[in-house]
Amino acid sequence: MAVLIIACPCALGLATPTALMVGTGRGAQLGLLIKGPQILESTRRVDTIVLDKTGTVTDGRMTLAGVTTAPDIERDLALRLVGALEDASEHPIAQAIAKAARGEHPVLPRVETFQNAEGLGVTGVVDGHALVVGRPAFLLDWAMPLPDTLQAARRDAEALGQTAIAAGWDGEARAVFIVADTIKPTSAEAMAP
């Protein structure tokens, strides 16, 4: 673009649109979609930014961050049973639990009567145990309230921005699986003081 300026009463008359165009272009190079120069100009009034963390600030790959079990349940048993059931699901959170289970148990038990309750969780039979895995409210629908220790683990995880998946079998809530996403190194650098 060639511009010949003979007389300009205000340098901002040319500089402002050029800066907005450059800012919009640079945002596009960095993967930011800016609807138009007016939007970029109005950002001076922004006092809060809310991001969808999955895939934007984070890697977008969920991993199992921890397992809390009821006092009489071994972590190994909980991971094997729940991992087998979650392996039958395509949900990213379920796949994170299944991947961790396969890491410790290369051969998972067979699942019978698998059912997916969309947005709530899954049910099925693994090694003769009737499992219910999903949101704590889903377990409550099956008359399996979380005991205090599991409820505390759920609250602690959610306070950290992690996802808590409740698991119960044979009529009792038995474990909480904590699933999280890893913050991208570039995002972590941006958040550092």
Image (cartoon, grey):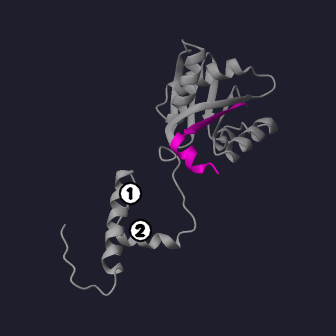
Q: Indicate the secondary structure of the residue bearing disc 2.
A: helix
Q: Which residues are magenta?
A: 174-193
Identify the amino acid type marked 2.
Answer: Leu
Rate crowding at label 2 as few (under 14), some (14 to 19) or many (20 or more) other CA atoms within 10 Å: some
Quarter occupied by residue 14? bottom left
Quarter occupied by residue 128? top right
Work out whether residue 49 or residue 94 is closer to the camera in this orientation and state it: 49
- Taking 11 as reference, is 142 left or right? right
Residue 68 percent coordinates (x, y): 73, 30
Is residue 176 part of the magenta span, yes or no? yes
Count of number-bearing discs:
2
| Whole-number angstrom distance, CA of label 2 to CA of label 1 | 10 Å
Identify the amino acid type marked 1.
Answer: Gly
**Do the CB atoms of the residues marked 2 and 1 lie less than 8 Å apart?**
yes
Residue behind mark 1? 27
Looking at the rendered image, the quarter that the N terminus falls into is bottom left
Name the residue furthest top.
107
Please tell me whether residue 112 is drawn above or below residue 61 in the rendered image.
Answer: above
Residue behind mark 2? 40
